[in-house]
Image (cartoon, rainbow, N blue to C red):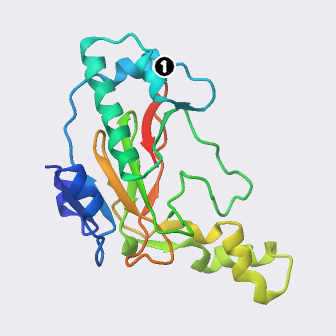
Amino acid sequence: MNQTFSDSSQIVIVSTFSELVTTDFKGEKNALCWYRNLEGDFKDIVSKLQLKENITEVEPQDLLALQLSYQGNIAREIILNDFRLLTDFGASPSLNLLKCYERDEEFDFISTDVYSFHVDRSPIATDTFLCTYHGAASDIVANEHAEQKILIPEIREKLAALHDGPSEEFENFLKENYFDLHYQEKPNSIPTNLGVGHLWRLAVDHPKQQVPPCIHRAPIEKDGEYRLLLIC
């Protein structure tokens, strides 16, 4: 078992998909990991797929159309099985071939793209599932090791200067522009990398959530290497 995972105060390790979807988040535990050492050649799949944009969605039929090696076929069956498990559970998985995400460069004092630590928000009770099959993997950080950016005085002051409206509407302004979803690591914080092959379930901010939402970020991609990511 990955020592970093077992040492983390926010992560629960499970060994089956059933455990992944039925285990409750509690206290500080807002990230569940179905820990797996996957066989198969996922790089073979990535090399055969065609990147049409910086983010290209890959459908199951696209996978089935690929001519793969024996190990590549094993990898394909794993992805298709994950699709089936999540779909049968009621989720809507999406497989993405990624070169990079769009960067937010509008302001020099706050970033609101996915490379910034952030939480997901939903009006309904749901969770975020994700698995990186190939390439760089996402990071999470414990909630006590990060601070909401809108609470940092110098950032809040600059956001207030941007706000063109009554002061009583400032909090709504922050929410409507998603500034409140983003976090900054505290000094000496140690993020946890989610690794390759593990299927994760992360807590989302919604009205029925009993734990703090999981703070996470997309990784900076490695030069010349695409990511293959399942997410829903």
Numbered circles on residues, count: 1
Residue 177 locus on image (x, y percent): 71, 66
Q: Is residue 5 visible?
A: no
Residue 225 locus on image (x, y percent): 45, 27
Amino acid at the residue labelled 1: Leu
Left or right placement of residue 223 versus residue 55 in this view? left
Left or right placement of residue 33 versus residue 51 in this view? left
Is 20 drawn above or below residue 72 in the view shown?
A: below
Characterize the local packing of mark 1: few (<14), some (14-19) or many (20 or more) Cα atoms within 10 angstroms.
some
Residue 83 locus on image (x, y percent): 38, 39
| Towards the viewer: 188 or 210 | 210
Is 111 drawn above or below residue 41 in the view shown?
A: below
Q: Locate residue 4: give its quadrant.
A: bottom left
SS at mark 1 in the image:
loop
| Towards the viewer: 7 or 31 | 31
Q: Locate residue 37: give its quadrant.
A: top left
Is 136 drawn above or below residue 6 in the view shown?
A: above
Instruction: Tell me which residue sits at (33%, 61%) in the image.
Output: 190
Instruction: Tell me which residue sits at (62%, 24%) in the image.
Output: 52
Residue with the mark numbered 1? 49
Q: Is residue 167 visible?
A: yes
Left or right placement of residue 121 versus residue 179 in this view? left
Instruction: Tell me which residue sits at (64%, 43%) in the image.
Output: 102
Instruction: Tell me which residue sits at (28%, 75%) in the image.
Output: 26
Residue 163 locus on image (x, y percent): 80, 75
As drawn, the residue found furthest toward the left would be: 1
| Towards the viewer: 79 or 192 | 79
